[in-house]
Amino acid sequence: MLRRLARWAGSIPALLPLGFLAAIVLTLVFATGLENFGLSFFGTDWNPSTGDPSKAVFGIMTFVVGTLITSVFALVFALGLSLALALSIVFYLPPRMSQVLAPFVDLLAGIPSVVYGIWGFWIVAPVFGETINPTIVRYLGWIPGLQGPVIASGVGIPLAILILTLMIVPVTTTLIRDSLRAVPQALDESGLALGATRWEVIRRVDIPYAKRGMWSAVLLGFGRAVGETVAVFMVIGDATKLPASLLDVSYTMPGALVGQLDSAFIQPNYLHALAELAIVLFLITFVVNFAGRRFVSRIVVRPTGALSVRGAGP
Amino acid sequence: MNATEDSLVGTSARFRRRRRVDRWLGRLLPFTFLLVILPLLDMVYWIATRALPTFSWATLTTNPSGTSGGLYGPIVGSAEILAISTTIAAAIGIAGGIYTAEFASERMAATVRFTTNLLAGVPSIVVGYFGYFALVLYFGWGASLIAGSVTLSIFILPYVFRSADLAFASVPKDLREASLGMGSTRVQYIRRVAFPVALPQVLNGVFLAMAIGLGETAPLLYTAFWNNFPPTGLNQPVGYLTGLIWNYYDEPLSFGTEVTMAFQAAFILMVVVIVLNLAIRIIGGIYARRLRGLYH
């Protein structure tokens, strides 16, 4: 009896993560006051109207658009870079070199997001404002979406994409690297023995075999990009309007949450709207992470056979 | 003979081209590391350049005062928040990790791991909203050291939890079987056999959680609020380094020394994070060596 009680009590810490998830959802739902903003909630008009709260309109679409644009582009760049990094680490670099270089990628993950933010805002933004964005407009301005106008200070979508890319590269690189390492070595050796070059084996054997892991990198990287809050807020300009082009200023969902709560303290419908925006953000990241984690866990449990363990390598 | 060798080894133009593609990829792909290392160097260089000229002993020992001053209050605040939240996260995470690795059924363990990963994926500002609405408002704790620390501990919990679980789950099977086979109870096994082996990896998780917790802003903004002075109690609002950067980074340069203070705070954070990362690397190395040592 006592033993059963101890066992039951012992499971409490293990169940707390689930408990916290539930508590987060319940709290957010409660914080909305169940206020129904109707279809205008999915519109593009966000006007808290602090002077006369009864005239307020809360449409979250500008934040959704800003989040999606920055996250999708950052994800594409991060995946390309990560694939190159992971291939170098697993296949091309001598083990000693990758032991020296790989930690730099991990270090990117350790830099606080406010530090990315202040670096982006003061050091990188002028480069975008004076050089990069005008150059894009000059040479690629004929492409719809890249026609400008150029924001002189340099904040805006391109800078946010750069910062986000750097921030999610460690996540995607780790996942791609691990999935490439999980490919049975016997498969590689068969390919090489048949006369294929290293690159041909990578392209025809390793990458197809590691596809699940790649999908986990896509989904978890996207989840991380969507949820990134502070750094993006500091470099994207935070304008509550649909961006006129890919070079314009914008605003993201987490950015709106972090930037507007203090103005909403005394206005109930504003607070409710922000809580509902938080729920939308939570749901997006939850679904993406849920799907992504399923891919990860399946590569781990897959039986790999006697010759398959590549873990001894770099 | 020569002709046969050619066709076997393949010096045909086609083979040479295939081999050339492979070699050039091998030479070029590693240069992508520059795209990671150069931004890091740029960040370290510029933040140091902006922070160090005015950095002095007073920076570390005086409180911020409006538009100027040092960083003493936020440094103490960051340390206190970090100490409390790491303690909470470590207590829950290590206990939960041991339970998951040693006692839970296969299915339960899978569920716990899955939910822990999902908690790790919740955006920091959403955790911050939870802290604000639940702890600050509904529980009535107010914006305070304790509300901020508890909120942050929820955010960093998954990192401790996963490492502790992984550490105990990857203790070699033969150690476990030998220990239990000689009649030790499971608690004795965990204390005397598994814990010493798993400790470096557990510590690794704790350090990782500290590095992440130290760098977080969003969970604290509305739960810890702000204070120029070190907090005098758990129920007092508290300042912290990331919050100082957040508050001061976009003040006009002509206004005072706020932007420089923000860079100084960023510099301190960067140095501490790099040191913590080094610690994680070194401990990771010890762990790998220790596990290898078990077999030879």
Image (tube, coloured by chain):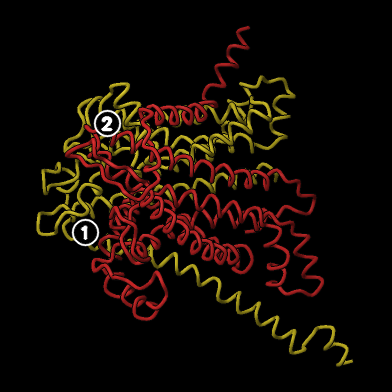
Chain colours: A red, B yellow
Question: Residue at 24% across / 69% down in the picture?
Answer: A152
Name the residue carrying label 2.
A268
Question: B137 or A213: which is nearer to us?
Answer: B137
| In the rendered image, the vertical position of residue A198 relative to residue A291, given as above or below | below
- Looking at the image, is mark 1 or mark 2 nearer the viewer? 2
Give the alpha-carbon distance from disc 1 to disc 2, as whole Å: 45 Å
| In the rendered image, the vertical position of residue B126 relative to residue A128, given as above or below | above
Question: Residue at 80% across / 65% down in the picture?
Answer: A190
Question: Where is residue B210 shown, x and y percent of the image?
Answer: 40, 40
Question: Where is residue B2 shown, x and y percent of the image?
Answer: 86, 93
Q: Chain of mark 2?
A: A
| In the rendered image, the vertical position of residue B181 relative to residue A241, given as above or below | above
Please tell me how crowded label 1 is: few (under 14), some (14-19), or many (20+) other residues with Cα within 10 Å. Answer: some
Quarter of the image holding residue A298?
A: top right
Quarter of the image holding residue A30?
A: top left
Kind of residue at badge 2: Pro
* Residue B241 seen in the current view: no
Quarter of the image holding residue B235?
A: top left
**Mark carried by residue B52:** 1
Question: B92 or A301: which is nearer to us?
Answer: A301
Asked if marks 1 and 2 touch (Cβ < 8 Å), the reply is no
